[in-house]
Image (cartoon, rainbow, N blue to C red):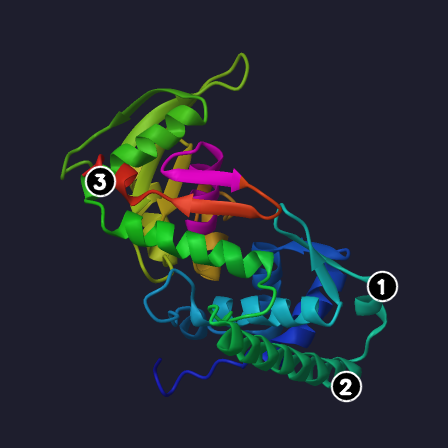
Amino acid sequence: MKASVKIPQYHELMWPALQVTKALGGSATVREMNERVVESQGFSEEQQDVPHGEGRMSELEYRLHWARTHLKGIGALENSSRGVWAITEHGRSIGQKEMQVETKKWRDQLRTSRKAISAEAAETGEESAEDVGPTDEATEATWKDTLIACLLEMSPAGFERLAQRILREAGFINVIVTGKSNDGGIDGMGTYRPSLVSFPTYFQCKRYKGPVPPAAVRDFRGAMSGRGEKGLLITTSSFSAEAQKEASRDGAPPIDLVDSDRLCDLLKDYHLGVDVKLRQLEEVNVNPAFFKDFA
């Protein structure tokens, strides 16, 4: 991280995250919450673009993840299996100072539990747990990071063919990959027919690690000019706030965005290289060999 770019710690993001959830009607997806926190706190494009290590998240997204984890820990937020976070009755009534006190108390209890488990494991010879009760979002982040790592190892052509397979699974017909270096930024196209009307759609794949900038959206739209008005931009990372605004800018053909979270969910939903085992808790396993077939 650049020394000149300062990003608030997770505990400084807890109150803004709670407040925007209230403002959104008491519930929000991760993306909605992140976007509104960025907007309400006035985070710069530079702050949003700082990556978290080699992972798919930005540093800001990573710290907001832990802000939600701690808000859930103190009972101020709860989340569903569909990734929707909702404010609880306690979350509606809690004040900022009270939240800080409860967070410290919860973290102290967590540390005590960890020490107790480590001590018991040492006595019994069992492996010690690194964490106590991981959140659903933390578990999801783990398998999604593994999956994105597999996608980043694929060749550009392989990733385009994987996108082709996803679109076919989603109901598109006549899906083709251009496979040309002079395609003007278009990686492929397909036709979506939800009912009587069909929609020719062009797609472009971006195997990025950092957030996709607005220039990439503008360039893709320019490449579509004269060909069609439906575009799909797929990436292994995220889209900056400015890129998201550019995608839905008034007066310009809209571009639908598929970020890393949505991409992982699609691969999971269509069982493409991702196996789901339902036990007491959902267990998701990534099959790296599946993606090597696209190389």
Gap between marks 1 and 3 measured at Cα: 48 Å
Amino acid type at mark 2: Lys
| Near-viewer residue (9 or 191) | 9
Across and down, in percent, residue 268 comes to 46, 39
The residue identified by callout 1 is: 89
The residue stretch that appears in magenta: 260-277
Q: Looking at the image, tell me whether mark 1 or mark 3 is earlier in sequence order.
A: 1
Query: Is 286 displayed left or right of 124 in the figure?
Result: left
Please, which residue is most extreme toward the top here? 196
The residue identified by callout 3 is: 292
What kind of element bears circle 3? helix
What kind of element bears circle 1? helix
Q: Please indicate, yes or no, whether residue 15 appears anywhere in the rendered image.
A: yes
Across and down, in percent, residue 263 comes to 42, 44
What kind of element bears circle 2? helix
| Near-viewer residue (51 or 212) | 51
Amino acid type at mark 3: Lys
Query: Is 215 displayed left or right of 117 in the figure?
Result: left
